[in-house]
Image (cartoon, grey):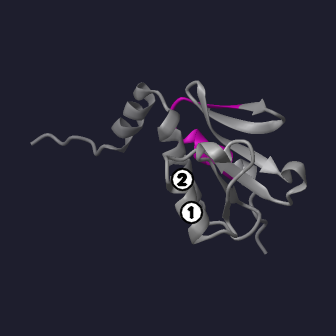
Amino acid sequence: MAKARDPLERLRRIVATLPETSERLSHGAPTFWGGKRTFASFAVDHHGDGRVAIWCKLPAGAQGALVAKDPVVFFVPPYVGPSGWVGIRVDGHVDWGLVAALLEEGWRTVAPARALAALEARAAPASRPA
């Protein structure tokens, strides 16, 4: 049987694909920055909640829609929840493609314009001579 990947390592690999990101401890948890602003944090059993989760900043309205759609996976995290952040459980079956998409969306809410441009340039198809 294949060994399950460490969710923190998966998170780090996803974040590493985004320009101008960094990781630092904040309040004892690995926290991820886009430029000078945070967009994600990794929490293990935060104050005894029993969850292994990623807390992710998202645009207005996303939190409510995700929690309503799947309250087992998505939740309103303490402290940052009132600002629209969503908790994503990563201690069970995880759709890492969805997690990656949500992290990119969260990063886009805080990333500097030059980082956004760098990601768009990387995603644009190469020009071909006529």
Classify residue 68 by image quadrant.
bottom right
Residue located at (53% from left, 40% from top): 107
Are the residues flagged by discs 2 and 1 in contact, CB closer than 8 Å? yes
Say left or right for 9 vs 86: right
Is residue 43 visible to us here?
yes
Q: From what the image shows, is residue 129 above or below residue 54? A: above
**Residue 61 in the image, given as x and y percentages of width and height:** 49, 53
Residue located at (88% from left, 49% from top): 47
The part of the chain drawn in magenta is 10-23
The residue lying toward the viewer, choosing from 41 and 121, is 41
Is residue 22 a member of the stretch shown in magenta?
A: yes
Say left or right for 105 vs 5: left
Residue located at (56% from left, 70% from top): 69
**Residue 129 in the image, given as x and y percentages of width and height:** 14, 40
Disc 2 secondary structure class: helix
Q: Which mark is residue 80?
A: none
Q: Which mark is residue 102?
A: 2
The residue lying toward the viewer, choosing from 96 and 113, is 113
